[in-house]
Amino acid sequence: MNYCVYALVFLIIPEIAFSQTTSPTLTAGPLVGSVTTTAAKVWISYKGVGPYSVTLVDTVDKTISNPIASHKTADKYGDTSLILDYTGLKAGHSYRVSHTLNAKWTPDCKFTTQIDVPVKDLDFLFGSCALLTTGFWRAFFPGADIRIYRRMAKTQTNFMVWLGDNLYYLGKDYKSYDNMFLRNLEVRSKFSLMKKFLAAQPNYAIWDDHDYGWNDADKNFPLKDTALKVFRGFWPNTYEDNVKQTYFTFRYNDAEFFMTDGRWWRNPPGDTTGDFLGPEQIKWLKEKLLKSNATFKFICMGSQILNDNNHGESYAHYPKERNDLLNYIVDNNIKGVIFLTGDKHYTELSKRDWRGYPFYDFTSSPISSPVLPRKGLKPYRNPLSVKGTVVYRKNYGRIKITGPEGNRSIRLETYGKGGKLKWNYTIKSEELSRK
């Protein structure tokens, strides 16, 4: 597997006097976000003022690429979250990050640009519920365990998909912009194993309730605009133009990912005709699915989709919208649809026949949050669960796509925190269509 080298590009901050010789201090990162055949996004955070450099160095021909744009958010304490956009990269080339910011230690940040071929073996990780606690909260959540990220970092896959609750706003965290900003910065800066994992591969993320607002927060969360600004400032996804939410798509060869926002328009539970994704996002999702020619179409969502057990949060609380989406997929015979979900604090694979279409929902949770006790699973019992796939330990999901064009398959896997394979399940591409 090739790797890309990032050296942190030379940016001269205009408000700095030329007499200054000190550089700002790197507080977190680098982290690689969206990557295509010719472009990439990189996130860092720093504190202080002064000149510094950020460069992308091609490890093959040693050419250097500078960012064409930058996007900043900051707090009142002088901390800056920065996303850098790079274009003009070369397909299949390796890049690694290096920088001139002051730092005691920086994780080795590397990635490879995509190759423009119709089909290619693909290997990625995904998961949800990544509680990491600092200070006061450590006494209340001792189950939060960082060690799983060491194993995940060693896996060396193409990218990571974060399915929400990527951090947890606790106490007063969700009550102001600066508190949200600080919580995100603490998680990124205080855990070396998390730093290493975030630097090990590109990352794509959606949010769920705990990195949006309070527990089970919906469209009525009063600081939703603030949460949006912070989330988009810390995750270098490629968002839809003129969309004031967090949904977007990305693609690797013949696999396309539809990253949804299940919070912004979600109605409080109780109204079965209420919105979950909302009309604007549903319209966008249907159009994108219909136009996609990808062999596999992964719809990523924070809440389970197929399970009708209404214990806990689920798309089943909103049957009008959910059933309309499933019927649309079946009526248009949109092939290759797989659902990736999180939230539950346990893992399982659900399978459901919907008017002749075999839908699968791979729920992966939790990565480092406390696990729902096994005895507590009884109210959550899911008749759609595939035998042998329920895991009630900290874990992460992995998906491998292989095979020649026209005969592709995906292998779904779950691994424990020590890296041991818990179960696997293979699906052929021709299975995923209306019969």
Image (cartoon, helix red, strand yellow):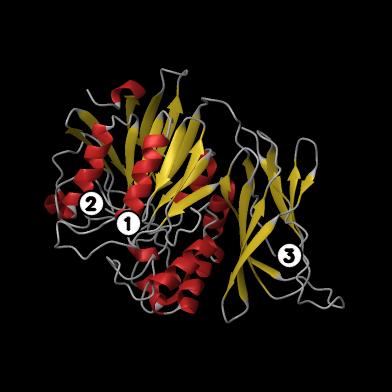
Mark 1 Cα-neighbour bin, 10 Å: few <14, some 14–19, many ≥20: many
Q: Is residue 368 visible?
A: yes
Q: Position of residue 219 (x, y in %)?
A: 30, 67
Residue at 76%, 35% in the rendered image = 60
Q: Earlier in the sequence, mark 3 or mark 1?
A: 3
Q: Is residue 181 left or right of residue 80?
A: left
Q: Which residue is mark 2?
A: 315
Q: Nearer the viewer, residue 397 or 350?
A: 350
> Which residue has dot 3 on it?
101
Residue type, label 3: Leu
Dots 2, 1 in contact, CB < 8 A: yes
Outermost residue, right side: 19
Tell me the residue at 54%/52% (across/down): 198
* Mark closest to the chain's N terminus, 3 or 2: 3
| N-terminal-most mark, 2 or 1 | 1
Res 405 label: none
Indicate whether 163 appears above or below 222. Answer: above
